[in-house]
Image: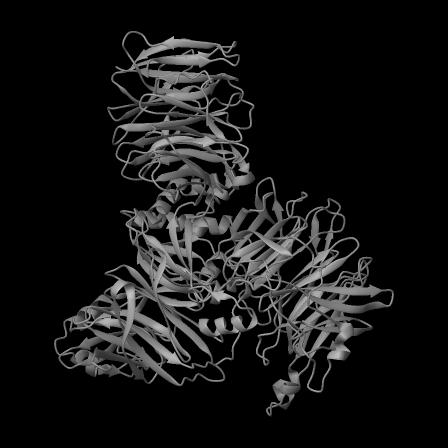
Amino acid sequence: MYLYSLTLQKPTGIVCAISGNFSGGKSQEIVVARGKVLDLLRPDDSGKIQTLLSVDVFGAIRSLAQFRLTGSQKDYIVIGSDSGRIVILEYNKEKNVFDKVHQETFGKSGCRRIVPGQYLAVDPKGRAVMIGACEKQKLVYVLNRDTAARLTISSPLEAHKSHTITYSICGVDCGFDNPIFAAIEMDYSEADQDSTGQAASEAQKHLTFYELDLGLNHVSRKWSEPVDNGANMLVTVPGGGDGPSGVLVCAENFVIYKNQGHPDVRALIPRRADLPAERGVLIVSAATHKQKSMFFFLLQSEYGDVFKVTLEHGNEGVTELKIKYFDTIPVTSSMCKLKSGFLFAASEFGNHALYQFQAIGDDPDVESSSARMMELETDEGFQPVFFQPRRLKNLLRVDQVQSLMPVMDMKVFNLFEEETPQIFALCGQGPRSSLRILRPGLGITEMATSPLPGVPNAVWTVKKNVNDEFDAYIVVSFASVTLVLSIGETVEEVSDSGFLDTTPSLAVSLIGDDSLMQVHPSGIRHIREDGRINEWRTPGKRTIVKVGYNRLQVVIALSGGELIYFEVDMTGQLMEVEKHEMPGDVACLDIAPVPEGRQRSRFLAVGSYDNTIRILSLDPDDSMQVLSLQSVFSPPESLLFLEIQASTGGEDGADHPASLFLNAGLQNGVLFRTVVDMVTGQLSDSRSRFLGLRAPKLFSIIVRGRRAMLCLSSRPWLGYIYQGHFLLTPLTCGTLEFAASFSSDQCAEGVVAVAAEALKVFTIERLGETFNETAIPLRYTPRKFVLQPKRKLLVMIESDQRALSAEEREAAQKECFGVGVDENGNIEMENGDEDEDNQLSDEQYGYPKAEKEKWVSCVRVLDPRTEETTCCLELQDNEAAFSICTVNFHDKEYGTLLAVGTAKSLQFFPKRSFEAAYIHIYRFVDGGKLELLHKTQVDGVPLALSQFQGRLLAGIGPVLRLYDLGKKRLLRKCENKLFPNTIITIHTYRDRIYVGDIQESFHYCKYRRDENQLYIFSDDVYPRWLTASHHVDFDTMAGADKFGNVYFVRLPQDVSDEIEEDPTGGKIKWEQGKLNGAPNKMEEIVQFHVGDVVSSLQKASLIPGGGECIIYGTVMGSLGAFLPFTSRDDVDFFSHLEMHLRQENPPLCGRDHMAYRSAYFPVKDVIDGDLCEQFPTLPMDLQRKIADELDRTPAEILKKLEEIRNKII
């Protein structure tokens, strides 16, 4: 079995983010690392975040930093990754790619303790960079420029110290003196030698300054001083002429200013009033705002509160450090302050946000200062400074970026009876958790909908002059009349436009530079700029049936098949040029757009009812000659020429020559695309794709300033170029009948469309996205969910540790404020007045923390069609739900029941313990409510439940047990205690049971009904830490482990047959186990390193009639698919393409692609589609070189890539 791996949705979580002028202009961009993907984002003028570039680096990005050389206008990006190399990138604006400027190897690959890459620090003046490991090693590289102003890098200078753990490093701003780097370190050499543990308890953290002597080219330890043992982070303080230099040390409950030869200045971090006393406050991310005259820091605590830190400084150094409460936003992994007044917050979980500064926190608020530390000191320590979180005052959220991180569980169903199934994913954590319903397609934003006085059959928009920015009229055609609407402040009907409104229209357009044309069944009306009207009438009783036009040419088809060709002459008149008889009636027409600098286009496409498409010439030399003919499967309904401009990188990040595509919508619902040779008119390289049950109508629209194609079948599709790929993606809106592009001052790039009896105006959201999502908020962190098949309800379990239940939170809120709580237990405002001391929403504020033995949990029944919760059962006294399944027992008394496995007061630290564990059985009563039948106490936490032959299988610790339903409790029927650790997944098929162990991979069991025994007959040879599993077929399981690998194991066919044909079961019973395990071993047939912890696997087909693939969801919020190949030729083609791309296009951050995909086990029988899809972004000569070696053309390779992608989504 060979698989093709393709990422459908790139990771959406963010590990780290930096901001800077990477393109070299005035605007600032943000570079974010999403695990193995590097993205470049830019907020546009309206504050919406656009993705400029997204690159898969095939390696784990651990740290990012930016620097600029003195006097230059552009920032470089430094990456610390798992490649054992430091990589410096430059963003190339012209080609829209990251160029690798330097790549220096210093160690082994992989994330190791002593190989640098975990920490990066840059000298604020851009003269040196330090890259550090968690332990021992730190290297400094000197950066400079040569005579041609290119960036140079020195060989590494060592700043190692063995037996030392590093917690954080940063550059110290000391102007143009020798660069200094600061690090928080702890020496553990004594603790290693001392067996009593005395030295370990006395180990002390130090703040150490390393100086790089540029003259001697040497790094030395300049200064070291003990620092608070809770110190976890350093922030650079501006120096030189801008500030006092030195660093801020963020420690538990304190922020301390330190510098060499300067006394410590420390201040308390204010804390929330409802925080338990034993919990400290740690700072998790920081951003610096620096202007000529002032600077301040924004520090965020682990609870989401942002504090503004300012320093009072003079000639004698820093005199006072103030920490003031600023605002509360969800906890971030990085914050980036942009010069344009924005703050980008890369959230730890849930959606990322872009905030605009409304103020910089100058108003009075809760403040703690170093000057007051003496007053606060008591015998036990320091008296805390309390504050109460409030609504946003200084920040305003202007945009958010969707993030699925982390996907806790995911399933694919078609619950809405749509053409394609939907993906249901449980995402997020705590108060930011949600159920996301993902549909393949692009989201749209509806701007306006207006009903019309009948059922329209067509709509057009026209400008009055070719140079106008906005459209002047919307023209709507009905069965017998034409309605003209003028576009201004509002859209209203006009009658003085010159259009004939007593007849339906076939086409309306701008013709020449400044006149309008209306084609109706009995003629052509040409409206000149000064209001003169020229009318051309059809000969005899014949009527016009079809029309094709561009700005300078018109071709009409009369009934019977006669074509008449008109051109605009120099004076702007429309002149008849040529007539031509076609062999039969014409089904559709289109003329190619006029090329730049030409008077006319050469190609006319004519579709006939005899299943052919002809390309005719419009040149005066060979007018109306057939240049080429293409036969298709079904009569064409609609034709569209789409010209794609030549590109050398640029916005869409790909090299391709100019090309002309002819698109045809056929009556059987297929879109047929073919390339037209721009010189000879020959057709080649045809591709087809089924779009829906109706014949697609094709329209040309503008998206992001480029021509794109809208295909209206049973649902709308958009065809556009994105990063070198032609993507054809459905739009998530209802059926549309007719469309045109729309531009006004309210909506610069929109689409106006006919939907039943209304006109809709909408814009198309972020391009390049695969899924459009709907989010339904949940109460606690969701764990698992199942489908109740009869009523199509989703039942999910949610649980959180160290949190308060909704009732307790409500009581606490009432005490503090008197505010209500909605049905999710989230806070609502009473009387809605914007009171100063008003509370925030929980999503932003987070839940109040409780002691560690406290658990909250609920079982929720949700109807996905109405998005309503029909039942939400809170579990009482510290019980938390861990597993769930639906089960039909033998006696059909209750129908489908719900089994939920719970544990009471579960503790993980210092060792795993719990007070009690139960299996609850619920029945569904009217309208999706749950009623408890009974609960059964069990002797371990039930982490896996499954239905099996009318009974319930439970994995309770290392025991697999079979239960039947009794009146008062569940009754044990049979058990097997021979599993190594803890059972976490159970799948069943016929009489086989596939059990997943938490750290020993899969075990296959068989249940012998006659003996009432469970036997383990096969297991895996590798100890795998399972995180997800799925049953593929009778002998095969797919699994994922916590190191980011996906693998398939299969029982050899002969062993499988032997076990099935063994009537007495003696083979299984008496056979000797091998390697301390089962008698038979499975074979690993597929192995692949995804590079991200996979949390759920599911077998599904995402397109109608498509092949089944394995879909996976990951902790970083990405979704991907494995598609099995059906032909050996495809396997050969893609494995050779992958091999050439590995050689010609090595990954960006210096990791070897083969080594990355084989990080833990050698990659086996999987082809990396993400690497293959980088082919169109290569330079054209490299594309040709690879194509020649594969005996293909680049176009054929692109066609292959598109075909295989279309099989998946």
Q: Report whether 562 appears left or right of 254.
A: left
Residue 756, by quadrant, is: top left
Q: Report whether 386 appears left or right of 1102.
A: right
Residue 825, how many percent across, how many down? 45, 67
**Total tally of numbered discs in the picture:** 0
Coloring applied to the structure? one colour
Residue 440 or 893: which is nearer the viewer? Answer: 893
Residue 932, how many percent across, how many down? 28, 75
Residue 705 visible to the viewer: yes
Q: Residue at horizontal 44%, vertical 21%?
A: 509
On screen, 638 above or below 845? above
Among all residues in the image, which is located at the extreme bottom?
196
Residue 347, by quadrant, is: bottom right
Q: Report whether 72 appears left or right of 1001.
A: right
Figure quadrant of the N terminus: bottom left
Residue 621, how many percent across, how many down? 42, 11
Among all residues in the image, which is located at the extreme front?
831
Residue 103 visible to the viewer: no
Among all residues in the image, which is located at the extreme right?
315
Q: Residue at horizontal 70%, vertical 47%?
A: 150
Residue 792 or 1075: which is nearer the viewer? Answer: 792
Residue 32, how many percent across, how many down? 57, 55
Residue 1162 or 86: which is nearer the viewer? Answer: 86
On screen, 968 above or below 994? below
Q: Residue at horizontal 55%, vertical 25%?
A: 468
Residue 1195, by quadrant, is: top left
